[in-house]
Every structure is written in structure tokens, then in C-alpha cells.
Image (tube, grey):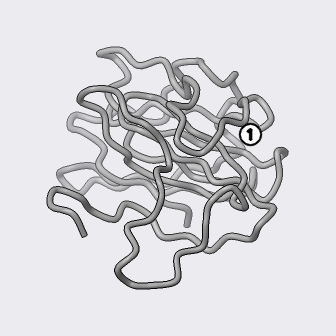
Amino acid sequence: MLQDTKIVSINIAHNNDYLVIATSLGQASIAQVNNYRLMNTRQSLGVIGCKLNKNDHVISAAICSSMNDYLLTITSNGYGKLSKLDEYRITNRGSKGVINLKLNKKTGIVIEILSIDINDEILLLSETGQTIKIPCNQIRITSRNAQGVTLCKIEDVLISASIC
């Protein structure tokens, strides 16, 4: 691996699935998995998934099996945005993508995206170890480029989220 790089997500996907790559500054690149070449050796560096703006980095990736899947975006200050994937324009591999979430001081940066079923529950974890479990069906569905809704009010910063 190159210096200053790390793996942020490992997913199992099929050719017709969609790969969503999210950045900390609110961009998302969506492309079909069959647009990516298969790498045959351990020494392969891969291909460019998305181009990044200055001071931006990839924070997560999710696999969606259809354009009807739901995508949940979670920010460091406890905001979340639940949108259907069909609200997003499909971009080519290696593009900057589209605006996934409107960021500001109130929302913080994006920490995670998850492909969810509306009946799933998510678990949020803060820097100090506070955990919060939220049913996804209680999160209001919003448009692609909204700032989201308040998922939780916490004193510190969210660092992780997962489906439970």
C-alpha cells in the first residue's frame, strides 16, 4: 500500500450492484460495480474510485443492490440523512461525484454511509464511548442534497456507526 493510505471499507459485490463512495466533505460517487476492473494480483494498486477535493478524504463505501435501496449518511455532530439511491445521479468511476449532504458547522463532517433496509437499526458510537441505538424507520426520508435531521444530541463527536 502507498504511504498515508488506509482501507476504509471492504464489501462483497456483484456485477449489477452499485458502489457508493462517500467523502468526509459530503460528496458521493455512485457507479455500477461492473465499471471497475478485476485486480488479479496482490501487488495491484486498484483503480481510481473518485477524485477528491482539497482537504477531503474517502470515509466509507457501501454496496446497493438496486436504485430502490436506502442510503443513510451520518455526520460527526449527530445528524443523519436517509435517501433513496434513485435520488442520486450515477457517475462514472473516477469522477468527483455529486453532493451527498450539505455540510455546515452544525452538521460536522460525514463519518459514515450505510446501505440499509428501512427496518434495520443502527448503532452510533461517540468518542467517549456513548452508544445510541436508533430504528431506521424513525429517520425521516430526505432529498439527496439536504443537511439531514438530528439523530441524536451528544456532548462530544460521533466516530462510528453500524447496522445492528
Q: Residue furthest bottom?
A: 41
Above or below 9: residue 117: above
- Check disc 1 and give the amino acid type: Leu
**Total numbered labels:** 1
Above or below 43: residue 112: above
**Near-viewer residue (32 or 128):** 32
At 45% from the left and 28% from the top, the residue drawn is 26
At 34% from the left and 27% from the top, the residue drawn is 53
Left or right, residue 138 beside residue 28: right
Q: Which residue is mark 1?
A: 85
The image shows residue 43 at horizontal and vertical percentages of 35, 80
- Which secondary structure lies at badge 1? helix
The image shows residue 54 at horizontal and vertical percentages of 27, 26
Which image quadrant is residue 85 in?
top right
> Which quarter of the rendered picture does the C terminus lie within?
bottom right
At 67% from the left and 70% from the top, the residue drawn is 13
Above or below 8: residue 157: above
At 50% from the left and 49% from the top, the residue drawn is 49
Left or right, residue 80 beside residue 143: left
Which image quadrant is residue 63 in?
bottom right
The image shows residue 135 at horizontal and vertical percentages of 63, 50
**Near-viewer residue (122 or 88):** 88
The image shows residue 97 at horizontal and vertical percentages of 56, 31
> Which quarter of the rendered picture does the N terminus lie within?
bottom left
Which image quadrant is residue 143 in?
top right
Left or right, residue 123 beside residue 125: right
